[in-house]
């Protein structure tokens, strides 16, 4: 299959690292953020083109130079223009932006659930495959344009934040919120970045060599993920042997997140796999053998993607 160049970003610039900071407001259903993208300029250019849809860009700069921003809503792109060409080599661009936490289940969206007391509660979570990372932050949103991601989230102090990588810093802020910083990710595609903020309970197990594997769920429901947890631990061992590449060579942990509102069965975000609750929960007293088999199939399907899909990724969506 041949793809039209009309839908591909210009090849002059490629990302190397994202330093992304986000501040969600789950009450107002908004978020704001800033991203600095380290890029490799392959040929001198005055313009850098990347993806953005539904975001308000407050400003863009390269060092101290302000860049002009032009949006192409049809192609879901923005073009950053400089008065002088970017020379070939390393550069960095910084964009400040804001947006709405979506009600539809793509991008950065709100998921609703009912607490034990009957009250409505909310969490924020993500679904970026195929092309919805651009709804959460400006980025080079093509699967072949892999980069390292360094994520920082500012959240209410009574909410837990989970992402692809482990937390390396969790600091209280004077206004009562907390700043959570995650370790840098391996080189990966934008659609595999994931984060969730909300109220979570968790259960934990370990692989034979001590790597933590957790299941996160809304309060009081984590134990329903016990079967999925045990299946995941066995699956990591199997796939590591099968491919000859231990999972831990790329990531130091694996989290499985049960999301109340989720469009697909599951999504293979690297190190932070998200699931529809019915695709991960097993009630040991009520669940049938076919239901357990279905949960095992979904969990192992997503684990297989940690190797093919995540470690090795299609160059373009037509190769799926």
Image (cartoon, rainbow, N blue to C red):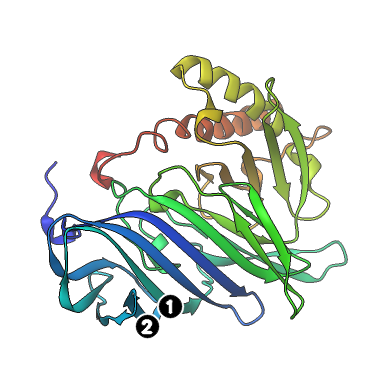
Q: Is residue 219 left or right of residue 122?
A: right
**Residue 144 at x, y percent in the picture:** 28, 46
Q: Write down the quadrant of residue 110 in the picture.
A: bottom right
Q: Which residue is mark 1?
A: 96
Determine the residue positioned at 50% across, 45% down: 269
Q: Write down the quadrant of residue 298 in the picture.
A: top right
Q: Is residue 173 above or below residue 91?
A: below
Q: Looking at the image, which is closer to me, 253 or 16?
A: 16
Residues under numbered marks 1 and 2 in contact, where contact means CB atoms less than 8 Å apart = yes
Q: Looking at the image, which is closer to me, 253 or 175?
A: 175
**Residue 186 at x, y percent in the picture:** 46, 42
Determine the residue positioned at 65% across, 51% down: 167
Q: Is residue 167 above or below residue 49?
A: above
Q: Which residue is mark 2?
A: 59
* Dot 1 or dot 2, earlier in sequence: 2
* Residue closest to the far right: 117
Quarter of the C terminus within the rendering: top left
Determine the residue positioned at 56% across, 29% down: 248
Q: Looking at the image, which is closer to me, 156 or 284?
A: 156
User: 10 Å neighbourhood of mark 2: few (<14), some, or many (≥20)?
Assistant: some
Quarter of the N terminus within the rendering: top left
User: 10 Å neighbourhood of mark 1: few (<14), some, or many (≥20)?
Assistant: some
């Amino acid at each position: 299959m041949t793809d039209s160049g009309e839908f591909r970003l210009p090849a002059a610039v490629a990302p190397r690292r994202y330093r992304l900071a986000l501040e969600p407001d789950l009450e107002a259903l908004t978020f704001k953020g800033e991203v600095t993208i380290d890029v490799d300029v392959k040929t001198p250019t005055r313009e850098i083109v990347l993806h953005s849809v539904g975001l308000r860009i407050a400003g863009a700069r390269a060092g101290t130079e302000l860049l002009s921003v032009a949006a192409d809503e049809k192609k879901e792109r923005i073009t950053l223009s400089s008065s002088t060409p970017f020379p070939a080599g390393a550069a960095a661009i910084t964009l400040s932006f804001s947006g709405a936490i979506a009600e539809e289940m793509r991008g950065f969206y709100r998921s609703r659930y009912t607490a034990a007391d009957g009250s409505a509660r909310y969490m924020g979570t993500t679904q970026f495959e195929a092309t919805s990372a651009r709804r959460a932050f400006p980025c080079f949103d093509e699967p072949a344009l892999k980069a390292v991601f360094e994520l920082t989230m500012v959240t209410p102090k009574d909410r837990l934040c989970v992402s692809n990588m482990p937390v390396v810093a969790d600091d209280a802020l004077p206004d009562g919120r907390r700043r959570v910083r995650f370790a840098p990710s391996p080189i990966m595609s934008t659609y595999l970045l994931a984060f969730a903020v909300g109220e979570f309970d968790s259960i934990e197990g370990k692989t034979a060599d001590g790597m933590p594997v957790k299941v996160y769920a809304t309060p009081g429901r984590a134990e329903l993920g016990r079967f999925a947890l045990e299946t995941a631990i066995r699956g990591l061992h199997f796939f590591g042997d099968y491919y000859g590449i231990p999972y831990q060579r790329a990531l130091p942990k694996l989290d499985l997140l049960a999301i109340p509102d989720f469009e697909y069965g599951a999504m293979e975000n690297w190190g932070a796999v998200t699931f529809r609750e019915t695709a991960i929960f097993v009630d040991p007293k009520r669940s049938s053998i076919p239901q357990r088999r279905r949960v095992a199939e979904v969990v192992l399907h997503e684990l297989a993607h940690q190797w093919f899909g995540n470690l090795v990724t299609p160059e373009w969506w037509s190769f799926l």
